[in-house]
Image: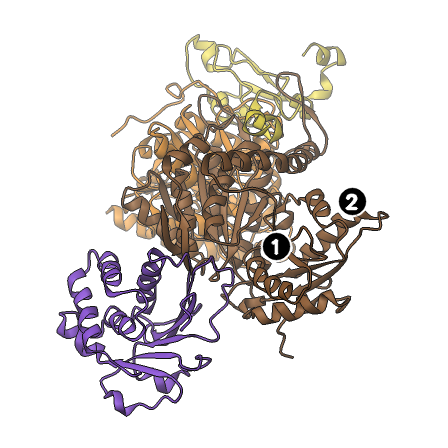
Chain colours: A brown, B orange, C yellow, D purple
Amino acid sequence: MHIIENGNVAAALGVKLCHANVIAAYPITPQTPLTEKLSEYVEAGEMKAEYIPVESEHSALAVCIAASSAGARSFTATSANGLLYMHEQVQWAAGARLPLVMCVVNRAVGAPWNVWNDQQDSISQRDTGWIQMYCSDHQQIIDSVIKAYWLAEKVSIPIMVCYDGYILSHTYMPFDVPDQEKVDKFLPPFRPDYALSPETPANLNTVTLPDVRIDVKGELAHGYMEIRYLLHEEMRTSLAVAAEGEKRFADIFGRGGDPYLEPYLCDDAQYVAVGLGSITYQLRVAVDTLRKEGIKVGVMGVRFYRPFPDEAIASALKGKKGVIVYEKALSYGYEGALASDLKSALYEYLAGTGKLPVVQNFVAGIGGRDIKTDDLIQTLRAATKGRVSIQPVWIGLKL
Amino acid sequence: MQAKTTILSLPTEEFVHPGTRACTGCGLAIAYRVGLKALGKDTILVVPPSCLTVLQGLFPIASTKLPCLNVTFASTAAAASGILATLKVQGKDNIQVAAWAGDGGTSDIGLQALSGAAERGENFIYFCYDNEGYMNTGVQRSGTTPIGAVTANTPFKGKLQQKKDVPAIMAAHNLSYVAACSAAYPLDLFDKIKKCMDMPGTKYFHIHIPCPPGWGYDARYGIKVGRLAVETGYYDLYEIVNGEFKLTAASEKLVEKRKLVPVREYFRSQSRFKILTDEQIAAIQSQIDSKWAKYYKKDE
Amino acid sequence: MGTRNYRRKTSHSEHGPGDGGRTGSWRVERPVLNKSLCIPCKRNTEACFICWLFCPDVVISRTIPPEIDLEYCKGCGICAEECPTKAITMVDEAKFSEDDKDKE
Amino acid sequence: MNKEFIEIRWHGRGGQGAITAAKIVAAAAFVSGYSGVVMAPSFGTERRGAPVMTSLKLSRHKIYDLSPIETPDIVVVLDHLLLAEADVTSGLKQGGIIVLNTPKAFESYKFKGYKLATADITAISVEAGLPHGMVNTGIIGSLEKATKLLGMDILIKGIEEEFQTRRPEKNSLAAKIAFEKTVAGG
């Protein structure tokens, strides 16, 4: 059924459809309406879940970590400084291999205070061992939440479903709310391999030594390094699992396609703009305009940022003249993290082939600065005419 | 009223294995061992980093026979809330959730989450085992380190500030049950746990834990030192049941006796207090005396 | 992969004795029980067991006579200190021959 | 007016319900065949009483550009006092429409190059039985009168659905009266 609602409601409906049964949250703009909505569902009895209004984001993720360890399908959401305050728990959840799903409603981080959108919050959590998915519209938000639970539980790795604060979270647009029946078919009940129980006592996340050690049965158990290696290795293989999930999703719901990338007019493009989230949809308008001028451009949204779909990206961009990365975050002192990752993937797969594109980097929309479509047109056009700068260029900077 | 447990009636089942990494003569090991007897088999534990993390064992071996979730330092009570929520949705109402955290993990870094959980009325038992310092990291001061104690980061002057009264903070949350216990009085601890297990909301236990390396006494004197803290009226055993304060066990008897052991004996039993001067001890003695004068008056 | 082998991929510990190794080797002094002074031994009935109650390391049995598991006893001496009849004394480990130690 | 792609900017005050009004119009447009509908409130630190803006884009195709409206076809002003506080005609296309809630006469306004429609929605709403100050449903009637965009039937249905539990008839009545009483310039 199609409804017109905002992005936070799309996320909340997704969580409800997935039957998450422990939800913990702490208010932070622009995430708040999402978890408020969930508290409504729970209090109204539309959702059979426990809703814990915790006293901090650190505790919100603590509740989810413990609930998941005890066998519950758990959910939380946050933004900006809330996510930063969770950081310790974010790492913990990954190391404990808990299949949590958390919505990150992207917002600029302080200081100074700013409640508007950029993606510095989730990008700063890149190396925590969480899968990161980025959404460009409400359909992707609700679908991604559902796909995320499936994938997280399949690979035992937590997932952040990231979407742009305000631009998506507070904007209303139509989207299809999947049938409960279909969601139940897609997503089986959560049955973890182990859940805390007096019947099968185990001590979880104990101090783990640098080296391997014999267990009580006389078998060799891992050391810390093996446990962490497995997290990395299975992050990598989760790319293939995500593709399996995407296909399964498409079979049941009749939509979806490429799990990692969302290309638009890229096939014959000589220049391809790349980004995360809603900016890639806005770039489509710029691409349409430049196409009318005869410039062969396309745009490609990256939906999976971690694990990084390096091979798919390199293969999609092979032989392009230029790649222009638009980012709402920055690795201060260098460039956008996506630009760095992308260059690394291109180098890895295309160095020496003569098909290595030139990569340029634009930084836009920091702290919610309006990204004018005309600015995207101008910058994209300029980038097709030659290198604008070796440094990342800030769009709309008024210095 | 439940009958008082004696050594002979104390359950014999053990939930802790021998051969732990706890220090020789560890006071926590005594309180923990007896505490788990009271909690029983149907318990899920939550433990933040602390001496107990070490006592509990290093992967892949656990020293405790109960299921346990190790959590981050500041998140103990929140994690307990998460387990409770799960048990609720699973319809399991026979499982007790018990958090065991140290004094740093409670009075300092864990206080926010604990206060939040207590305010929400999360139905679990929280144990703060108070060895009065960050012993696991090598004896640094914590919020509950007493005035005058030399620690690794109050090396010459000793701690200059008062001990934080965490049970009073928790009592201010209007809990159904708050208890102050000591490793030197394990049966009192056992009975108090049994007493509160079916009470609603968060139950808070503060347990005074003698620590040989942290306090500076010969391991064999652990119980004696713990007992001295009580007999001098320096650390009191009590319970607050729905707001009603009552001294218990040895502290209750002290009211009848009207005679406290001079606190000097307690201070002189440990090297951490070696810098306390006679004047300082006299000042503390007079604080203790006036506290007890109130207890006596209440008793009249 | 995934939820199926979760246990093998995390720090998932199962319980057993001796996480800290044979902690009996930590001992400097050994508790030695004099049955003629020990209350339950003398009366041949369940009594006292203060040593059992206060043992931090779960190495004293609640039996007549109480038995001390020297494989794990760390030799703290609390039992000796708390025994109301001084039935347990702490004896320098050096007094026990290497042969004795092997037998433990 | 190009009815393939329409941009409407709403000016109101925090708490006045401009978002709800825009949402009702958005939903009505969607069922009328505008498959691209995007309604974006001005974001951030709105407080009750402070001027707020909401933008509504309607298109026959999916809308990919979520950036704020710069050149609206229509502006809807829920409170005439906002004329002094906000530049409501900023970017308004030549020949664009201004829908204004005002107690003053139509003739007292001069907007050169724009079409004006006015009604005293505040009074009309009270007439319809709504509490004083509730103007977000009445204004929809004025908008329809000025634009002939979607037809009253579908809007009335949308209002009654949105206000299911909160005086649906009185809200739709306010829109109906407003539709009748709105003075729209050519």
Asked where in the image residue A396 lies, by quadrant, the reply is bottom right
Rounded to the nearest whole Å, what is the CA distance between mark 1 and mark 2?
Answer: 24 Å
Nearest the eye: A172 or A340: A172
Please give the name of the residue rendered at 70% of the width and 9% of the height, measured from the top-left corner. Answer: C103
Element type where label 2 sits in the image: helix
Q: Where's residue B193, x and y in %? A: 37, 33
> Residue A122: x percent and y percent?
58, 54
Residue in the picture at 60% in, 55% down: A276
- Location of residue A110 with respect to A63 vertically, above or below: below
Lateral position of residue A362 relative to residue C13, left or right: right
Q: Which residue is mark 1?
A: A123
Q: Residue flagged by tag 1: what amino acid is it?
A: Ile
> Percent from the top left, x then y, of residue B29?
53, 31
* Residue under label 2: A349
Comparing D160 with D113, the one in front is D113
B53 or C40, which is in the foreground?
B53
Residue B10 against residue A243 in the figure, above or below: above
Q: From where the camera sits, is residue C100 visible?
A: yes
Disc 2 chain ID: A
